[in-house]
Image (spheres, rainbow, N blue to C red):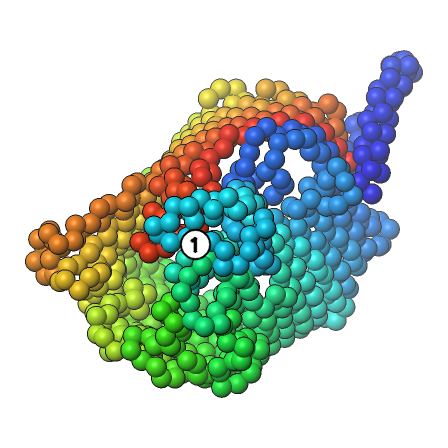
């Protein structure tokens, strides 16, 4: 088909040129003057492109194409056919394709195609395909392949790589392989809808996705606690089926759906042998790493909407789901028989969700909104028992406990109530106030209850002609009752209380203040200027160990203005900062360790669009992005605020990255339906991260053993692309 499209485009260009030459043969006096006929609106488009890439890397083309230099060619099309009203027909057909590769018969990773046809008012059929690629790294160092096998002739238990054995470290480096890591997803599916009955619509949909490849991960080996990077295998299949019936009238709208989702992991676990020599438990020769289990879900959904009056409406969403997972347990690698109560997990979770929303305008200048949401998760999975994990010294003890531990099922019930009211103070000013209350109940958690209240207000106003803005403030208070910081450790048999004051930030008591504002101005000459600002401040009053405070700041501005005939320029700048402060109990000598982590990102960009004439248009854009991450560490005597003499912390080096992207594009209209384009891209990325300076294998990474890290080095790159294109409209 794609070759035929290309041939059709060439033939169309030839016909246009031939018709232009033929027109020169007519005498203008022999043809009576006629009113120009209406030109048909173009409905179809097809195009081809040919490009070259110079340089690159995985980070440059992470979500599509290939990271290597070279030539590439592709195309796209949009074809549409619809019966004319004069003929009385109602049939329609539409086909789309994007990123179609001409280099081979296979579709490239990021290609897409869609087909839609049907009869207006009766039925509709849709088919689609999408290919999505993700490249995580192109210089990833590892001793294993994705199947868990040792590479380059390396044999199990053959390397003595302790922290003092430099020869062993050198041998690790000798066997390392540098590989590319990434995944690819292929999505395909379709839907069929029938609308032949008045007020009714029936739809069925089926989708399938296959994902394969590998992703970066790491495991710990018991032989002297050696740590190594691995390639976790990815081989997933996901199927989704939905059946929907919808009924729509002016006073009542209703929709009922059944959805079935099935996830299949074709590789249940990652199994590998240890290449290291060391003292281990008898029978230990490697490591098992469990991968996501296969599972399925059945879900029923019901949605209703009722227009009680012209200004009052109630909408309801109800959902019930049943999640199932019965994956077989696998034995520990150093035990040939499972130490579990059952051979399968026998997992089952029921979920119930309900939401009702009332919106009304009781008076001309007043509107209200009230909502209630309930979200219930009842975990009926069987609890399983298991021995504590083995330690490197070969014992079965975990902090002195040799008993059996039970994995409890986790359930929750969340409720939320919301109320919002708006009042128009004047023709150009509106005040909105809102209140929300959230209640969370959990089983088998560090805290079984959270309550949070949020109050806020915002003002929307047109300050002057062409000037509008919004200012809002919200405050929320979250409470956590009976916080048991040691619960997780106690379940595993650890009886010390050092973690009792540790708070998990997502569950801990929190006070939050948030301010948001924006201002937009439209000038008489067509210029538009907009600014936004947001500040979030979090404090955790009951937290002594853990995250004690954090804030988020975002600022932005955007301007668009004419700079000359047919020329428009735009500029923008954004800044985002995320700060986190935490305190940890990292020693038994009465010392607190503190960490202040700040992430900051600046984005500055601008460009020009120039329409030179009716046939030629040029665009130029440049975006500069700078990011930094700082780690400020310190050690203090507990409760004194005085620097610790026994433990002095050293801050980690600051990580910085810089990305500059420059794009230039132009398009020339040859005739009514023929366009030629030329575009170029240059991109430079540099990264200064202390992690990238570490060797792939080094004794400096740990105090007791060798650590094998990805060792990718700097992910920076310089890359350029030039693409020529031609497209036709008809």
Q: Is residue 587 above or below residue 309?
A: above
Residue 127, located in which quarter of the rendered image?
A: bottom right
Residue at point 59%, 28% (across, down):
54
Question: Which of 497/556 is in front?
Answer: 497
What secondary structure is found at the residue carrying circle 1? loop
Check the picture and name the quadrant holding the C terminus.
top right
Q: Is residue 651 above or below residue 226?
A: above
Q: Where does the image place residue 471, in percent across and percent down from the top left?
A: 30, 50
Residue at point 34%, 77% (across, down):
397
In the image, 262: left or right of 640?
right
Q: Where does the image place residue 605, in percent across and percent down from the top left?
A: 43, 32
Question: Which of 640/621 is in front?
Answer: 640
In the image, 158: left or right of 535?
right
Q: Quick check: can you spot residue 441?
A: no
Residue at point 83%, 29% (across, down):
10
Q: Where does the image place residue 274, in percent across and percent down from the top left?
A: 49, 60
Residue at point 46%, 83% (across, down):
384
Mark 1: few/some/many CA within 10 Å (<14, 14-19, 20+): many
Check the picture and name the quadrant holding the N terminus.
top right
Q: Where does the image place residue 95, in percent across and percent down from the top left?
A: 76, 48
Number of marks in the rendered image: 1
Question: Which of 201/354 is in front?
Answer: 354
Q: Is residue 365 above or below residue 671?
A: below
Q: Quick check: can you spot residue 19?
A: yes
Q: What residue would you read off at disc 1?
A: 160
């Amino acid at each position: 088909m794609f070759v035929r499209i290309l041939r059709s485009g060439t033939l169309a260009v030839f016909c246009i040129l031939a018709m232009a030459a033929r027109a020169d043969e007519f005498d203008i006096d022999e043809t009576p003057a006629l009113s120009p006929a209406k030109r048909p609106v173009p409905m179809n488009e097809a195009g081809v492109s040919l490009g070259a890439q110079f340089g690159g890397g995985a980070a440059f083309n992470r979500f599509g194409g290939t990271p290597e230099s070279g030539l590439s060619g592709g195309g796209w099309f949009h074809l549409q056919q619809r019966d004319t009203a004069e003929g009385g027909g109602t049939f329609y057909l539409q086909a789309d394709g994007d990123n179609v590769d001409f280099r081979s018969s296979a579709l490239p990773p990021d290609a897409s195609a869609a087909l839609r046809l049907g009869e207006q008012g009766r039925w509709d059929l849709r088919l689609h395909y999408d290919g999505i690629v993700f490249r995580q790294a192109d210089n990833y160092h590892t001793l294993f392949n994705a199947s868990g096998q040792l590479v380059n002739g390396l044999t199990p238990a053959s390397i003595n790589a302790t922290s003092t054995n430099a020869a062993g470290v050198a041998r690790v480096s000798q066997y390392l392989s540098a590989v590319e890591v990434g995944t690819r997803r292929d999505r395909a599916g379709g839907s069929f809808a029938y609308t032949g009955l008045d007020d009714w619509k029936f739809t069925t949909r089926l989708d399938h996705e296959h994902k394969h490849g590998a992703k970066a991960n790491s495991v710990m080996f018991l032989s002297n606690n050696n740590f190594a990077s691995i390639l976790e295998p990815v081989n997933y299949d996901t199927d989704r089926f939905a059946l929907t019936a919808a009924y729509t009238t002016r006073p009542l709208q209703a929709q009922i759906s059944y959805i079935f989702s099935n996830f299949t992991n074709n590789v249940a676990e990652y199994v590998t042998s240890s290449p290291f020599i060391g003292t281990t438990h008898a029978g230990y020769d490697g490591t098992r790493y469990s991968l996501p289990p296969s599972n399925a879900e059945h879900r029923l959904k019901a949605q209703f909407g009722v227009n009680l009056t012209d200004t009052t409406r109630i909408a309801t969403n109800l959902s019930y789901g049943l999640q199932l997972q019965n994956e077989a347990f696998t034995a520990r690698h150093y035990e040939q028989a499972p130490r579990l109560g059952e051979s399968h997990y026998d997992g089952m979770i029921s979920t119930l969700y309900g939401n009702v929303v009332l919106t009304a305008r009781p008076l001309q200048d007043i509107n209200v909104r009230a909502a209630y949401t309930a979200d219930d998760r009842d975990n009926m999975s069987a609890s399983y028992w298991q021995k504590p994990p083995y330690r490197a010294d070969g014992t079965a003890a975990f902090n002195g406990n040799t008993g059996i531990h039970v994995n409890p099922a986790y359930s929750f019930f969340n409720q939320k109530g919301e109320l919002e009211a708006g009042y128009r103070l004047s023709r150009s000013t509106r005040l909105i106030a809102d209140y929300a209350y959230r209640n969370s109940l959990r089983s088998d958690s560090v805290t079984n209850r959270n309550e949070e209240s949020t109050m806020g207000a915002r003002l929307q106003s047109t300050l002057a002609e062409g000037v509008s803005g919004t200012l809002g403030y919200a405050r929320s208070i979250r409470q956590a009752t009976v916080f048991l910081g040691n619960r997780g450790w106690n379940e595993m048999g650890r009886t010390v209380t050092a973690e009792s004051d540790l708070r998990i930030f997502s569950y801990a008591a929190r006070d939050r203040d948030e301010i948001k504002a924006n201002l937009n101005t439209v000038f008489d000459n067509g210029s538009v200027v907009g600014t936004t600002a947001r500040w979030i401040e979090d404090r955790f009053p009951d937290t002594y160990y853990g995250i004690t405070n954090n804030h988020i700041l975002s600022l932005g501005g955007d301007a668009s203005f004419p700079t000359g005939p047919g020329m428009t320029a735009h500029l923008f700048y954004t800044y985002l900062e995320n700060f986190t402060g935490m305190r940890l109990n990292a020693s038994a000598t009465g010392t607190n360790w503190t960490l202040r982590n700040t992430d900051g990102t600046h984005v500055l960009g601008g460009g020009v669009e120039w329409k030179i004439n009716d046939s030629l248009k040029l665009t130029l854009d440049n975006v500069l992005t700078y990011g930094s991450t700082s780690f400020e560490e310190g050690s203090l005597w507990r409760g004194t605020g005085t620097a610790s003499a026994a433990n002095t912390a050293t801050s980690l080096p600051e990580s910085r990255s810089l990305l500059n992207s420059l794009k230039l594009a132009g398009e020339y209209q040859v005739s009514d339906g023929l366009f030629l384009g030329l575009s170029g891209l240059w991109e430079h990325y540099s990264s200064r991260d202390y992690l990238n300076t570490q060797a792939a294998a080094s004794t400096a990474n740990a105090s007791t053993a060798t650590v094998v890290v990805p060792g990718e080095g700097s992910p920076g790159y310089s890359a350029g692309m030039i693409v020529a294109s031609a497209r036709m409209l008809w």
